[in-house]
Amino acid sequence: MHKTDLTTRCLDLQQFDQAVPILTDLLHCCVHQGASIGFVLPFSIQDGEAFWQQRVRPSLATNRRVVIVAEVDGKIAGSVQLDCDLMPNQKHRADVSKLLVHPSCRRQGIARTLMAELERQALKRQLTLLVLDTRTCDAAQALYASIGFEVAGTVPGFALDPFSRKFDATTYMFKKLRT
């Protein structure tokens, strides 16, 4: 892949609606590859579509969420969300949600590119703090640390592993942004 082949963009509501089938497939593939992103098996295409339509679309429609996609040669290869739907005393921050990269496109810098765009969007909105959680010791934790996220703490037994049915710890991380 050449660097010029990778682009990012924020989806407006119409673009989101058109992309839901692709985003659903992306989510479905990631869950079935073991991504710890809130879902367990069995996880159907219908479950994936319901997530996008019922959980993401309403907050996107009211500008409380930003959906960013990464495209390789014009095709969606990953996505991440900037969730600004928080309480009134937290308007200075946002949650990073559902960083997804299609399994066939991993190890190409897509996650880093998505996170860089997410930070640009956060700064554009004058946010000063990003917060996320990730499965403890997951590859994503190392990625987040490498781009400046710091560990706030770990919660044992936080989430059910999609395959083993054991409970995994989660690590909360944050990044202070320059404004």
Image: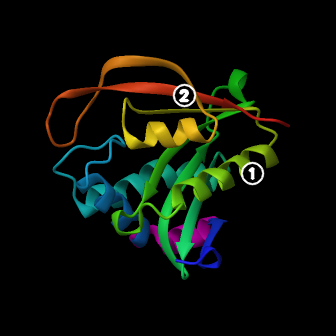
Q: Tags 1 and 2 in contact by the CB under 8 Å rule?
A: no
- Furthest toward the right, the residue is 179
Picture quarter containing residue 122? Answer: top right
Magenta stretch bounds: 12-21
Q: Nearer the viewer, residue 166 or 5?
A: 5
Q: Is residue 166 left or right of residue 136?
A: left
Q: Amino acid at mark 1?
A: Arg
Residue 90: percent from left, percent from top: 69, 25
Q: Indicate which disc, 1 or 2, sits on the residue closer to the N terminus.
A: 1
Residue 164: percent from left, percent from top: 14, 37
- Identify the secondary structure beneath mark 1: helix
The residue that label 2 is drawn on is 173
The residue that label 1 is drawn on is 120
Helix, strand or loop for the magenta stretch, by majority: helix
Picture quarter containing residue 128? Answer: top right
Q: Nearer the viewer, residue 67 or 148?
A: 148
Residue shown at the point (64%, 36%) measured from the top left: 148
- Identify the secondary structure beneath mark 2: strand
